[in-house]
């Protein structure tokens, strides 16, 4: 079994928030819109923006109590999409690991700093 009913509801809420946020960003004039790559993960299709928004929501759930796992979550999830994985390859993961030593607020700034 995947989890309790409360956990499943929380996952659904996080996913819907991330998708709503990503859709709003995709509609913005500064964003690439329909020209973005779409990746299929299971039965869902996600653009890079949608995926990054989803990563942020999941990682921020760990804060403020567990900055180490917040960083690990962000790094792991970012590597699951070919366009966002490039962000981790450029040293951003290392910076995230260093931010753990600076505390939860530093990790929050690191996570929120990723462009969708």
Image: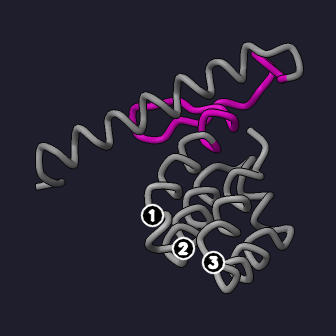
- In the image, 89: left or right of 23? right
Other residues around mark 1 within 10 Å, as few (<14) / some (14–19) / many (≥20) = some
Q: Which residues are magenta?
A: 31-52
Residue at label 3?
Answer: 103
Question: In this view of the protein, which residue sits in the foreground, 99 or 19?
Answer: 99
In the rendered image, residue 23, in percent from the top left (x then y), is placed at 62, 20
What SS does tag 2 mark? Answer: helix
Pointer 2 or 1: first along the chain: 1
Cα gap from disc 3 to disc 2, whole angstroms: 7 Å
- Picture quarter containing residue 26? top right
Marks 3 and 2 close (CB-CB < 8 Å): yes
Pointer 3 or 2: first along the chain: 2
Cα gap from disc 3 to disc 1, whole angstroms: 12 Å
Dot in front, 3 or 1:
3
- Picture quarter containing residue 43? top left
Image quadrant holding the C terminus, namely: top right
Residue at label 2?
Answer: 67
Marks 2 and 1 close (CB-CB < 8 Å): yes
Residue lying at 45% horizontally and 31% vertically, measured from the top left: 44
**Which numbered dot is residue 83?**
none
**Which numbered dot is residue 62?**
1
Other residues around mark 2 within 10 Å, as few (<14) / some (14–19) / many (≥20) = many
Position of residue 86 relative to residue 104, above or below, is: above
Question: In this view of the protein, which residue sits in the foreground, 10 or 41?
Answer: 10
In the rendered image, residue 56, in percent from the top left (x then y), is placed at 58, 49
In the rendered image, residue 103, in percent from the top left (x then y), is placed at 63, 77
């Amino acid at each position: 079994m995947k989890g309790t009913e409360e956990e499943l509801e929380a996952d659904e809420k996080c996913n819907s928030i991330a998708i709503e946020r990503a859709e709003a960003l995709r509609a913005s004039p500064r964003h690439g819109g329909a020209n973005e790559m779409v990746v299929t993960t299971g039965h869902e299709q996600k653009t890079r923006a949608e995926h990054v928004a989803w990563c942020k929501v999941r990682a921020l759930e760990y804060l403020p109590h567990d900055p180490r796992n917040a960083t690990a979550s962000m790094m792991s999830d970012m590597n699951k999409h070919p366009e966002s994985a490039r962000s981790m390859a450029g040293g951003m993961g290392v910076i995230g690991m260093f931010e753990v030593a600076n505390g939860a607020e530093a990790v929050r700034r690191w996570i929120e700093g990723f462009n969708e």
